[in-house]
Image: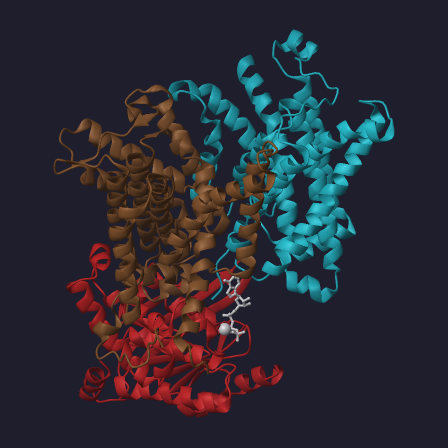
Chain colours: A brown, B cyan, C red
Amino acid sequence: MLYREAGQFKASYKEDQQIFPIRQDRVGMAVILAIFFLAVPMFASEYWLQAILIPVLIFSLAAIGLNILTGYAGQLSLGSAAFMAVGAFGAYNFMLRIDGMPFIVALILGGLCSALVGVAFGLPSLRIKGFYLAVATLAAQFFIVWALVKFPWFSNHSSSGVISAQEVNILGFAFDTPVLKYLLTLAVVVVLALLAKNLVRSTTGRRWMAVRDMDVAAEVIGIRPMRAKLSAFAVSSFYCGVAGALYAYTYLGTVEPEGFNLDLSFKILFMIIIGGVGSILGSFLGAAFIVLLPIFLNVFMHSVFAGSLPAGLGSNLELIVFGGLIIFFLIVEPHGLARLWTLAKDKLRLWPFPH
Amino acid sequence: MGFFFEVLIGGLLSGVLYALVALGFVLIYKASGVFNFAQGAMVFFAALTFVGFQALLPGWTGLEEGSVMVFWLAFILALASMIVLGILTEKVVLRPLVNQPQITLFMATIGLSFLVEGIAQAIWGANVRALDLGIADEPIGWILDSADMIVSSFDVFAAALAGILVAALALFFQYTKVGRALRAVADDHQAALSIGIPLQHIWAIVWGVAGFVALVAGLIWGARSGVQFALTFTALKALPVLILGGFTSVPGAIVGGLIIGASEKLAEVYIGPFVGGGIEGWFPYMLALFFLLVRPEGLFGEKHIDRV
Amino acid sequence: MMNDMAQDATAEGGRRIGEVILDLQHISLSFGGVNALTDISFDVREHEIRSIIGPNGAGKSSMLNVMNGVYHPQKGNILFRGEPRQKMDPHTAAAQGIARTFQNIALFKGMTVLDNIMTGRNLKMKCNLLEHALFWGKAQREEIEHRKKVEDVIDFLEIQSIRKTPVGRLPYGLQKRVELGRALAAEPTLLLLDEPMAGMNVEEKQDMCRFILDVNDQFGTTIVLIEHDMGVVMDISDRVVVLDYGKKIGDGPPDEVKNNADVIAAYLGTSH
Ligand SMILES: Nc1ncnc2c1ncn2[C@@H]1O[C@H](COP(=O)(O)OP(=O)(O)OP(=O)(O)O)[C@@H](O)[C@H]1O
Ligand SMILES: [Mg+2]
């Protein structure tokens, strides 16, 4: 009886409304945070930090962003990568053009730029719905990447829009090693994830979900669909924007607009489908899955074909596995990995005395 | 002025092709209620399968390379593959998702497009392959002489072919039994079921026709720029056409295709130079969006008030 | 909440029927070629239970939709508390104290019972997005304060045990009850109910009837009710409007309407 809710009576609504109402969840969360903040930096190799942990964290953030828009507010977007680009180029320009700009402020400002652009491209959602809107978000995807390439001001006149992130310096302390970059990313992502969790369980989140589930009924109880949708676009793009800035500053160091292409947008969409639409936890699980899968496939292929890997087979296999998994999850487990986790917890709740 | 018309005609000609691909979407939407994002992948799959068989057939059968016989055999084999692919899609992907929200179906077809692209390249390889339909791509002489405009013979051929196909499909919808049954299905799945229209047959026919359309589009595009992964982007070209014309309207697809084709070329030539060019990628989307802000029901859609 | 309101109502004299609060004058509404409503006039008085009856397709639901701004009639005037209403949207109606339920359940399927009812209070919740994100101090206090009111509604409707169940998993009768809860959470002055008892068994109907009467009685809420069950309608209504083919064919107290020749003809002409 490790995981039990019984016996934990909530004496007040305040207790019932805690972010993690069950004690074991709170303990579990503390342990996980301790592992990621303390143990991982001590033991993880540079490869693990740079090629796996940092990107997983950053993509989790982008996935949370898309999940807010798609999972909670019900507006499908195919332009997440473009909003990441706005955040990256926004932060870059704030750092570049304003002397002594603190990195964290630039990060937030980059996110806000992205939020603004997101609201602009969210305007059509007031008139059109469903996959019409999804297609419309492609306009954002193509237009933004094009604009970043074509207007050299954005990249400070570098060729084909490539930017190199400035050194990250917070209060005179340089974040220049993989461990430090990892810790910085982790801190930002954890804080934003907690804020997102708060948002989705508050009135704001309920308004989003109401519009998602039945917009006419939402309007009748006094929710303004326009505000709900646009606020979802804004918050979602903010998260994607911050993720994009981190992508440039703590992950790749050098990015170009073309890197934030439609493929990346699809990848983020796949993360939320596999991880769990409408779940913050799912955003993490999905991001980890999508980052790890190609690495795993690669290792698998090399062990099977042992050096004589047919050219191109690896990337094709990746396409096939991704595509197949998406279809599989949509059909078999539309709530994704997060749902499997909840099911496991429910089992545990009854264990060892199943009724 | 001659130059303006030259651009306009070029745009309209490619617009016919957009209309053709958009029609593939409309067909499947009408029959299965799905916005099939994988349509572009299917164009790619069709063209790749065609050139694949075209290369293999002479070795298998001893027929002369590049002969008419090989062309048609490859065409039939590719078409058969498309029909199989369509039926599999219907059975394996769409049937289990029936009654799910449209957004879910849409996401499933995004997954499907990855799957189809991967399978196509795993079977036939990822190299760019040449495709020759035997039509020259050069300015038509008499137009050049009389009006001093460059109009490519290949474009005219392609547009004519696509135009015939589009017209044939429109007639097919309007006047054949299957076409009418199909319209009933599109209006109301449940009603169509209760009238006793064999949905299975309709689905098979529609996916067959959509496969045929994809194949023709793939051949035309492939002959122009080589059979390669970029063919999947034909879908991206057709999407704004659909926002403009609506997913259920055949005339919408045609008119939308022409508008998008013409305006995108004109915009590239007349607006492009001021903003650094390359605006073809997004201009059609923006155009369609602005249009929707004014008329959310699309070109031919009817105004509709949600029932509560 | 409920107690406060009950007291207010008693102070005003409980169930005593008051002034006209909603006055519909010459309303006509059509969709494309279909005339859903033709030149309909009637009024609703404070604290009364006003029923709308009529055969299928008579225009009853359309009438409710006109009342709270979901549909916009092509002709006619609407006076709410004596004020003429020009362009009305559902949001404004909600802000003015009009709540409703729907003929086909319109709950938020992905949310729990508690969350569904909480949305009913959204107009009364003033914190902004940033405060929600921090969920500290003001936002938390506000959430708790409204949670208490929602728990009152949950107690009133006797649905404590399903509080945290996603509504999609509930049986039909309970969903209808939750939908009523969502409307009640807004503490409306005018409550529009579109066939709240359709598809229920006798027991469920009795419960629902009791809730409707209690709401009307304890809180003085004015109720407009669409219902097909004549027994119920005749039992609990103060006045009844009868529609047929979008036209008004009867209006008055239940007894009077029951004996109206046009009404009898309309009902005998259809299968009810
Ligand atoms: N949004 C709409 N679009 C088109 N026609 C509509 C719409 N809403 C209602 N109608 C039409 O208006 C007429 C009246 O419909 P309404 O739903 O008001 O009837 P009702 O009296 O509520 O019937 P029921 O007892 O079946 O609920 C019907 O002919 C209906 O088809
Ligand atoms: Mg009705």
Q: Quadrant of residue C5?
A: bottom left
Residue A26's x, y, as percent?
Answer: 27, 66
Give the percent coordinates (x, y) of residue C148: 23, 77
x and y, in percent, of residue B262 in the image: 55, 27
Q: Nearer the viewer, residue C191 or C261?
A: C191
Residue C88 shows in this picture:
no
Give me the residue at 29% from left, 61% from top. A29
Q: Nearer the viewer, residue A268 or A341?
A: A341
x, y percent for residue C89? 35, 60
| A71 in relation to C9, above or below | above
Q: Residue at x 66, y 53 (%)?
A: B90
Depth order, front residue of A286/C120:
A286
Q: Residue furthest top?
A: B145
Left or right, B128 with reference to A168: right
> Does any portion of residue A130 appear in the rendered image?
yes
Which residue is pictured at 21% across the width and 27% down the height?
A: A96
Quarter residue A338 falls in: bottom left
Task: Note whether C263 is above or below B302 in the view shown.
Answer: below
* Direction right: furthest residue: B62
- Quadrant in which the C terminus of chain C appears: bottom right
Viewport quadrant of the N terminus of chain C: bottom left
